[in-house]
Amino acid sequence: NDIKASIPTELGKLSNLIYLRLSYNAFTGTVPEGLAEMKGLQLLQLQSNRITKIPTIPRLIDNIHGQSTFVADCGVPSAFDEALECYNCTMCCNADDGCYPQEEKTFRS
């Protein structure tokens, strides 16, 4: 599609949205915080854009899509000066168009 714009904040208001595939465009800037509030979201694919920041989005649980449930450009080598941080991504893609599964991160208190 090659859409060149920021991701519309209005997408966060689509509370019944289940699948959101915005990959392979030219979206820029920050992912809207409202996407983190979408409780029914099962699939979020943001890779191959020019996104510079992703809010902490709760881990998406979906057995149908497995490791491609939440995909972003958080891999190395990065197209950015610093790799994009994505805390709950299930897969990270890099500047070489390679995508690799992320291990689930566990934090100890």
Image: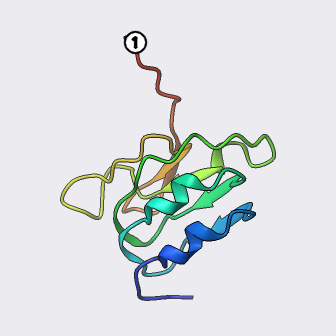
Report x, y in % for residue 91. Answer: 54, 47
Q: Residue pushed farthest right?
A: 64
What x and y, as percent, mark residue 82? 21, 54
> Which image quarter is the C terminus in?
top left
Q: Is residue 85 left or right of residue 12?
A: left
Residue 64 location in percent, x, y? 81, 46
Give the amino acid at mark 1.
Arg
Query: Which colouring convention does the figure follow?
Result: rainbow
The residue under label 1 is 108
In this view, the residue in front, 97 or 67, is: 67
- In the image, 7: left or right of 16? left
Which residue is nearer to you in this view: 52 or 93?
A: 52
Identified at 49% across, 88% down, the residue is 3
Residue 83 x/y as whole percent: 28, 52
Element carrying mark 1: loop
Q: Mark 1 packing: few (<14 Cα in 10 Å), some, or many (20+)?
A: few
Q: Quadrant of the N terminus?
A: bottom right
Query: Count the marks: how many?
Result: 1
Q: Is residue 98 above or below residue 61?
A: below
**Residue at the spot 49% in from the left edge and 80% down from the top edge:** 25
Q: Residue furthest top?
A: 109
* Residue shown at the point (62%, 56%) measured from the top left: 38
Residue drawn at (42%, 58%), measured in percent from left and top? 73
Q: Quadrant of residue 80?
A: bottom left
In the rendered image of this protein, does residue 19 appear above or below residue 106?
below
Q: Is residue 53 left or right of residue 18?
A: left
